Amino acid sequence: MKKASKLNSQWILTPLLKSDNDPKIEDKTREVEEKCYEFINKWKDRTDYLEDPAILKTALDEYEHLSANYGTDGDVGYYFGLRSSQDQDSPAIKAKYNKIVDRSIKIGNDIQFFTHRLAKVSPEMQKKFLEFPGLHDYSHWLELLFNEAKYLLSEPEEKILALKSVTSYSNWVRMTSSFISKEERKIKGKKDKVSFSELMKLVNDENKEMRDSAAESVNDILRTHADTAEAEINSILSDKKTNDELRNIERPDLPRHLSDDIDTEVVDALLDSVESRYDISKRYYNLKKKLLGFKKLKYHERTMPYGELNKKYSYEDAVKMVGDTFKKLDGEFHSIFEDFVNNGKIDVYPRKGKYNGAFSIHGLKTQPGYILLNHADELRDVTTLAHEMGHAINNELIRTKQNALNFDTPLSTAEVASTFMEDFVLDELEKGANDELKLAIMMMRLDDLVSSIFRQVACYKFEQELHHTFREKGYLPKEEIGKIFVKHMSNYLGPDVEMYKGTENWWVYWSHIRRYFYVYSYASGLLISKSLQGAVKEDKAFIAKVKEFLSAGTSDSPRNIFLKTGIDIGRKQFWLDGLDEIEQLLVKTENTAHSMKKI
């Protein structure tokens, strides 16, 4: 590891391009187009790959090579995608990126015949392909393709659905969010008007007058746009219903399960398990209410932080802490971390125009991964580094073991590696903390767990009832949507959180419900992570099994991958065991608060 003072703090993107004006840009772009159309022109008029497993093997090897080395936008698209997150205000970068995206979309449309036709082969031919030894490395990729094919329409019909999705779905969703994002309000304690996104942060402010004033403004904005959101939600629910009927899909959440490669019974077991333990989230809010000295928490106060997390952690401190934790866990984890830290793969500090969050990204199998942070010396920044490095380690392990068609992570397990690493770092942070800081960290952990597991399952249940009721009645007024929303939020929040007048409209801004049924993945990822953490704490050698899972990519279904480690995520008991771990943390936090005479 480099000395702290010499750590790179900005991305080194030269493995992709030398600069924004690299003379090779046009050549590289042309090369991607040439390689893609070489493949397209070779196979578009042929049918032999749909009939002969050996010829399909040749075609898939070429398709995999294309996916590994070129994709549809190559190094140039990846580079300008990264640069646009470093400098969102640059018109020159935007223009170059948009140009690449347009080319990429055209190539994507022109090449989709290959997978579409392959998906539609007869069941007999599917069986022949899946049993052919030469196609073993592609077998699960083919299985997924064949499973989704049951619900595919003809090529022209699929094109029509893709085209109308812009006007029937995307524009509606964009309209509501853009109206809300333009809103500003004057609130108590702030000199200037405050944007909606800033208001959503201020509803948690420790100053009661300010947070209540921010919540009033949020309520006013959501009430203003509730009629618009009513029209939007009914339109996209109708669009979804039409699509499902055309594809003969009965359960509205089935397309999500198919695209995530997760069995419906696994998701149902997860939902039932979490719902049966809503007592944990209710107990948590009871504890929080007491610690904050409130008679009741208002809905907007549910994520208010408890305690002082004001100890400062420089980036160098964070690197040392995360590095030491990884070294204890596994040597390969640590060496991947060193590579990212030392070789310009982490963009560390906030800058004007830079994207405001954090992410870990990988491009093609042959391209380096990168992490973006906005490190501000807070405790959260230490855990964010661990979290994003978890994603990066996951990607690097897949890179070493899988072909390009399996170089991905299913949504259902996407948060496993990140929360696994984050939790081990939090364990280390707790060890060196005094009682006050320890209690604050435990409350922060519980807050994240309740928000990511119980709240997201409540959201999923809200979505299920929303789609079911719409299909039954044909239209849902905003008042009815609000009632369904309040019902499901109250179910997990319990009697210590007040859903006061106005909160019935808080579905209006919630983007999650527009990305149908994806929220279960927060809960599944965290609970699987908890299970793996428990196994590693019991037996350090289990880390080898964890690495097997992290290296598997999409080479098999999550359920089958876990079965190889002796875990069956289809069993309700598996999810209940993970929830027991959360209850143990809650008990420990309650006991700490009692011993400190805080409650």
Image (cartoon, rainbow, N blue to C red):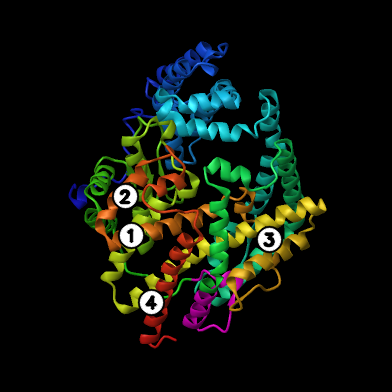
Q: Quadrant of the C terminus?
A: bottom left
Kindly identify the amino acid type of the residue bearing the numbered disc 1. Answer: Ala
* Measured Cα–Cα span from mark 4 to mark 2: 29 Å
- The tally of labels here is 4
Q: Which residues are magenta?
A: 282-304
Q: Residues within 10 Å of mark 3 (few under 14, many from 20)?
A: many
Q: Which mark is residue 535?
A: 1
Residue lying at 18% horizontally and 47% vertically, measured from the top left: 2
Please tell me whether mark 2 sits on a helix, a strand or a loop.
helix
**Residue 449 percent coordinates (x, y):** 47, 64
Please tell me whether mark 1 sits on a helix, a strand or a loop.
helix
**Residue 7 percent coordinates (x, y):** 24, 47
Kindly indicate whether the residue at mark 2 contacts the one at mark 1 (C-beta within 8 angstroms): yes
Task: Give the residue pinned by disc 3.
Answer: 221
- Residue 452 in the figure: left or right of residue 425: right
Residue lying at 55% horizontally and 54% vertically, measured from the top left: 520
